[in-house]
Image (cartoon, rainbow, N blue to C red):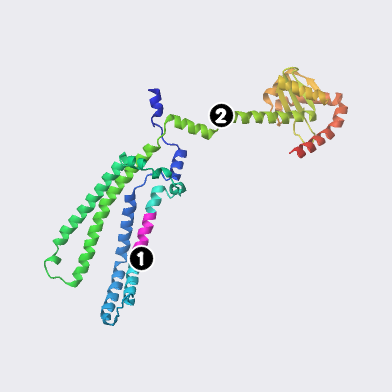
């Protein structure tokens, strides 16, 4: 049962998984939404510009019919009036074409969150596999799309049937009417038909998009093992992080040990702790810890101090407090000022020759450190 729970997708998709799926083009999208947007935009553009467009077509048609006897038709040539007619009709239909194109782009952008998905355009060899394509025909999503297509067919057929029934009942087909009535009849009939189509297709598009969102969300759900693996990858390999920490500690120890020869004094426990301090008048506001260590590291600090004749003072309580509370590279705590001042005063009196050479040693260390950097 525990293994089965691990394999079940019970966890919400992480932000990383969502962003990666978006880059691959795996997001909820419904073609029906683009159809509804394009149909609505085209109908709106045609409605707004119908009056001017109809007048242009009417005026040009009247001019063409009035001068039709002057038009010469020759084999292999298109008469100029026909080209002009195509231009007029094209100008009338151009706003509708532009509106539908913009609406289709807007529909796609709304579904993708206006995010660019370059990986979605990449070549995917698995799409060429006929066996995989045959298997996709019998998936739940394929069956749902088939049901939506059938619903669209019924909706369009129902709208056309209702429109035809109303059209045939119009007086236009049974009584003589004025010519102006024909224009109103065509406009009202087209408006009624497209309005019904928009309403029905809008409902289908909403249902299709809702299904795609639910299905896509379920597909992106993750197992507990996948979530743990992603967190592990985002946090980094623990072995690599441990190795980096070890290297950082070694580097810090090397820096500490390199600073020991320039210390004013090394305060010892005498065996367990060692803390190297420096104090430059006019530079340091308080004594600064150059290095500290216990056990093996303390022995190395004392060995370096002895090698470079750095004064060492045994003071067990001060050494313990410095090791426990002070930080390398920072001034000592204020409650230790008095005790450390007494130690420094003692070494200044007893190691005058060392402090006479110490400024030049620090200058040489600063030069060598700058060249090493």
Q: Looking at the figure, which quarter contains the N terminus?
A: top left
| Residue 226 quadrant | top left
Q: Residues within 10 Å of mark 1 (few under 14, many from 20)?
A: some
Q: Residues within 10 Å of mark 2 (few under 14, many from 20)?
A: few
Magenta segment: 93-105
Which residue is depicted at the point 42% across and 46% down? Answer: 25
Is residue 342 something one can see in this rendering? Answer: no
Is residue 371 something one can see in this rendering? Answer: yes
Q: In the picture provided, is 179 more to the left or to the right than 50? A: left
Q: Position of residue 311 (x, y in %)?
A: 82, 24
Q: Looking at the figure, which quarter contains the C terminus?
A: top right
Which residue is depicted at the point 33% across and 50% down? Answer: 31
* Most foreground residue, 311 or 152: 152
Residue 190 lies, with reference to residue 316, above or below; the image says below
Q: In the image as oriented, which residue stretches furthest toward the left? A: 174
- SS assignment for the magenta stretch, majority: helix
In the rendering, which numbered label is found on residue 238? 2
Q: In the picture provided, is 193 more to the left or to the right than 172? A: right
Q: Is residue 97 magenta?
A: yes
Q: In the image as oriented, which residue stretches furthest toward the right? A: 353
| Secondary element at tag 1 | helix
| Residue denoted by label 1 | 94
């Amino acid at each position: 049962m525990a293994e089965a729970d691990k394999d079940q997708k019970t966890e919400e998709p992480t932000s990383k998984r969502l962003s990666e799926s978006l880059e691959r083009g795996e997001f909820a999208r419904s073609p029906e939404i683009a159809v509804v947007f394009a149909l609505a935009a085209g109908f709106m553009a045609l409605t707004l510009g119908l009056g001017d467009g109809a007048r242009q077509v009417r005026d040009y048609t009247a001019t063409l019919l009035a001068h039709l006897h002057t038009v010469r038709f020759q084999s292999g040539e298109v008469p100029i009036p026909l080209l002009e007619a195509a231009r007029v009709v094209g100008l009338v239909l151009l706003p509708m074409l532009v509106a539908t194109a913009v609406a289709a782009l807007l529909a796609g952008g709304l579904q993708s969150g206006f995010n660019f998905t370059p990986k979605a355009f990449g070549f995917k060899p698995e799409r060429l596999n006929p066996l995989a394509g045959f298997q996709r025909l019998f998936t739940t999503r394929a069956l749902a799309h088939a049901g939506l297509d059938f619903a669209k067919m019924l909706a369009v057929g129902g709208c056309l049937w209702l429109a035809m029934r109303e059209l045939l009942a119009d007086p236009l087909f049974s009584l003589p009417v004025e010519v102006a009535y024909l224009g109103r009849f065509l406009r009202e009939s087209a408006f009624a038909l497209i309005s019904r189509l928009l309403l029905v297709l809008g409902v289908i598009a909403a249902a299709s998009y809702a299904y795609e969102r639910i299905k896509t969300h379920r597909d992106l759900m993750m197992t507990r093992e996948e979530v743990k693996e992603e967190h592990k990858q985002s946090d980094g390999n623990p072995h690599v992080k441990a190795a980096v920490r070890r290297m950082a500690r070694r580097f810090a120890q090397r820096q500490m040990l390199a600073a020991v020869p320039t210390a004013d004094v090394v305060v010892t426990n005498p065996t367990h702790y060692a803390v190297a301090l420096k104090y430059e008048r006019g530079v340091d506001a308080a004594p600064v810890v150059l290095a500290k260590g216990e056990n093996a590291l303390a022995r190395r600090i004392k060995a370096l101090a002895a090698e470079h004749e750095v004064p060492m003072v045994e003071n067990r309580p001060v050494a313990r407090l410095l090791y426990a509370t002070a930080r390398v590279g920072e001034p000592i705590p204020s409650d230790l000022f008095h005790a450390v001042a007494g130690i420094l005063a003692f070494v200044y009196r007893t190691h005058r020759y060392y402090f006479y050479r110490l400024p030049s040693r620090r200058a040489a260390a600063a030069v060598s450190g700058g060249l090493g950097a």
